[in-house]
Image: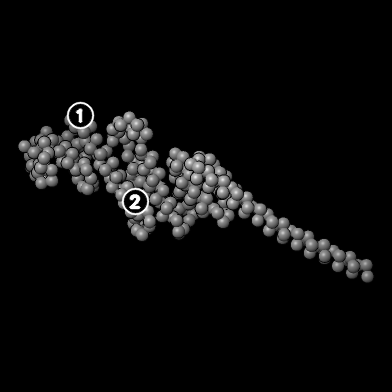
Amino acid sequence: MKYQHIFRTASLAVVIALSGCSSSDDEERVIAANQGAQTLYDDAKRQMDAGNFAGAAATLGALDSRYPFGPLSHQVQLDLIYSHYKSGKPDQALATIDRFIRLNPNHSDVDYAYYMRGLTNMESDNNLFQDLLNIDRSDRDPTRSREAFEDFRRLIETYPDSKYAADAQKRMLYIKNRLASYEIAIARFYMRREAYVAAANRGRYVLEHFPDTEHVQQALEIMVACYDQLDLTELKNNAIKTLKINYPDSDFIS
């Protein structure tokens, strides 16, 4: 009986020791993981500071996959959004943005995510060759510009006090000019094919939806020309009257 008591006491001591080691090992693994995450994040920040956004995106992507629920996870995702955007990968940026918004709808930086969504869509609509060669491609598909406009509108309406709201408002005006120029380009396309009703409707659309853009005069002149071709005298005269009031130097005023 004496030896059995000693054996039980020794066994219990071993169990306690092993349990203590297991707990200690778990803590060390957590500490090591956090240190590994911080090291990776520091590397990514150095790459971002050096302008190596493609490298930063790769490092941040690995960090996001390896430590998806760590203390740095939210900041990693936000930096990953920016790195994808700066390295010219809009699809990856949008996917990361949408995931962040879906998983963190109440995060303090969700307004930044909406802002970056607008920037990314806006940038996707730009044409590098158009900028380099000064080629007018206002007739290109404006889908991404429309999405950017909605992104900025949602940001302003949902987070009116956001520090990004003022810049978003300015960008919305730029986008409205882009969308109005598209409508003008399509109207001229219809005019060349003598589709005057369709062309006049495009001009009227600019007046109704983009009245604060630089393309209103062109829209009115298109309407005057189309109504003249269609023998719609009253509509033509109304358009001329509006031209006289707002653009008295227009060549369309006889």
Q: What colouring style does the render use?
A: one colour
Return the x and y of residue 39 as percentages of the image width and height.
60, 49
Q: Secondary structure at mark 2?
A: helix
* 136 up-or-down from 171: above or below: above
Q: Quadrant of residue 222?
A: top left
Instruction: Check the image and report above or below for 218 versus 169.
Output: above
* Residue at 62% from the left image edge and 50% from the top image edge: 36
Q: Inspect this view and state whether residue 135 appears.
A: yes
Q: Which residue is label 2 attached to?
A: 167
Q: Are marks 2 and 1 in contact (CB under 8 Å)?
A: no
Which residue is at the far front? 50
Residue at the disc numbered 1: 193
Locate residue 245 relative to residue 170 in the image: left or right. Answer: left
Residue 13 locus on image (x, y percent): 82, 65
- Asked whether 18 or 2 is in front, the reply is 18
Type of the residue with mark 2: Asp
Question: At 41% from the left edge and 48% from the top edge, which residue is drawn?
Answer: 116
**Residue 248 rendering spot, x and y as whole percentages:** 10, 42
